[in-house]
Image (tube, grey):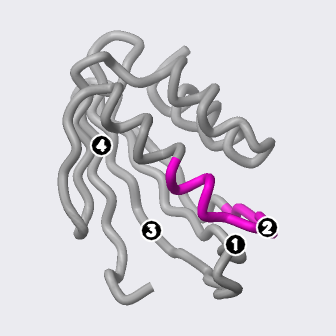
Amino acid sequence: MNYKEKATDIYNQLGQGKLLDAFDQYYAEDVVMTEPRGTRKGKVECRKYEEQFLDSIQEFHDLEVKNIGANEEAATSFVESIMDVTFKNGHRAKMEQVAVQQWKDDHIVHERFYYNNEQ
């Protein structure tokens, strides 16, 4: 699979409620994940953050992938998506973001999320 196909597979799994399965399959042990709220390093710390995010969701309504692409030579992919969720506190949000993924072989070694921090 090329990097665009791998990124597509990740988001297909997310849409099926398999975020942690995709994470385990595609993220490197030394992954760094960066977003406006901070940076996490290492697969254990990053997975724990993803588990906490999932635990905060009451209902997952929709995932729409707007754009997906890759620069295969640079081992980089990007995904623009909108996630519609209701959190356990009752707040419903449509979270729009762009994720840029840097790959090494079959695993993401760095992922940066761009979004409005006021979501």
- Where is residue 28 drawn, in percent x and y? 33, 19
Q: In this picture, which residue range is highlighted in magenta?
A: 52-64
Q: Earlier in the sequence, mark 3 or mark 1?
A: 1
Q: Is residue 40 above or below residue 44?
A: below
Tell me the SS state at disc 4: strand
Q: Are marks 2 and 1 in contact (CB under 8 Å)?
A: yes
Position of the N terminus, as image quadrant, is top right
For the residues labelled 2 and 1, the Cα–Cα distance comes to 6 Å
Q: With 79 as the anchor, is 100 left or right in this view?
A: left
Residue at image position (51%, 74%) is: 96
Q: Which mark is residue 59?
A: 2
Q: Earlier in the sequence, mark 2 or mark 3?
A: 2
Majority secondary structure of magenta residues: strand
Q: Are marks 4 and 1 in contact (CB under 8 Å)?
A: no
Q: Amino acid at mark 1?
A: Val
Q: Which mark is residue 111?
A: 4
Q: With 38 as the anchor, is 21 left or right in this view?
A: right
Tell me the SS state at disc 1: strand
- Where is residue 39 drawn, in percent x and y? 18, 51
Q: Amino acid at mark 4?
A: Glu
Q: Residues within 10 Å of mark 4 (few under 14, many from 20)?
A: many
For the residues labelled 3 and 4, the Cα–Cα distance comes to 12 Å
Residue topped by disc 3: 97
Residue topped by disc 1: 85
Q: Earlier in the sequence, mark 2 or mark 4?
A: 2
Q: Nearer the viewer, mark 2 or mark 3?
A: 2
Residue 79 magenta: no
Tell me the SS state at disc 2: strand
